[in-house]
């Protein structure tokens, strides 16, 4: 399947948001995920399945002050 992640096309096997984050080595990082324009709560990462044509935006939290 083809999905778009932060504006770049990726070809993947079907998987959940949680599985994608593990694939992208983002587990445990401070991130926010938007799936097709909707924010995905962390508690739902395992339940949201990615489908062909989906769009993900993944934003990393940056500390500072």
Image: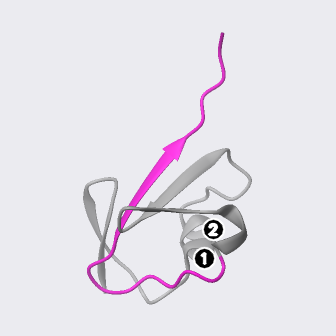
Give the x, y percent position of residue 59: 49, 45
Give the x, y percent position of residue 21: 58, 65
**In the displayed structure, does residue 65 sit left or right of residue 17?**
right
Location of residue 18 by image quarter: bottom right
**3D distance between C-alphas at marks 2 and 1:** 5 Å
* Figure check: 50 above or below 34: below
Location of residue 27 by image quarter: bottom right
Badge 2: residue crowd in 10 Å (few <14, some 14–19, many ≥20): few
**In the displayed structure, does residue 34 sit left or right of residue 2?**
right
Q: Which residue is rendered at x = 67% and y = 44% of the image?
A: 30
Query: What residue did someone put label 2 on?
Result: 22
Give the x, y percent position of residue 3: 31, 74
Query: What residue did someone put label 1 on?
Result: 19
Q: Which residue is rendered at x = 66% and y = 23% of the image?
A: 63
Q: From the viewer's side, name the closer residue of 31 and 23.
A: 31
Give the total number of marks visible in the rendering: 2
Element on which disc 2 rests: helix
Colouring mode (rainbow / by chain / secondary structure / one colour): one colour
First to last magenta residue range: 46-65
Element on which disc 1 rests: helix
Q: Is residue 54 magenta?
A: yes
Magenta: main secondary structure equals loop
* Figure check: 19 above or below 13: above
* Figure check: 7 above or below 59: below
Give the x, y percent position of residue 4: 29, 66
């Amino acid at each position: 399947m083809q999905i778009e992640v932060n504006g770049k096309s990726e070809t993947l096997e079907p998987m959940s948001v949680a599985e994608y984050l593990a694939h992208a080595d983002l587990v445990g990082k401070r991130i926010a995920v938007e799936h097709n324009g909707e924010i995905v709560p962390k508690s739902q990462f395992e339940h949201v399945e990615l489908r062909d044509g989906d769009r993900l935006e993944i934003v990393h939290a940056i500390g500072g002050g």
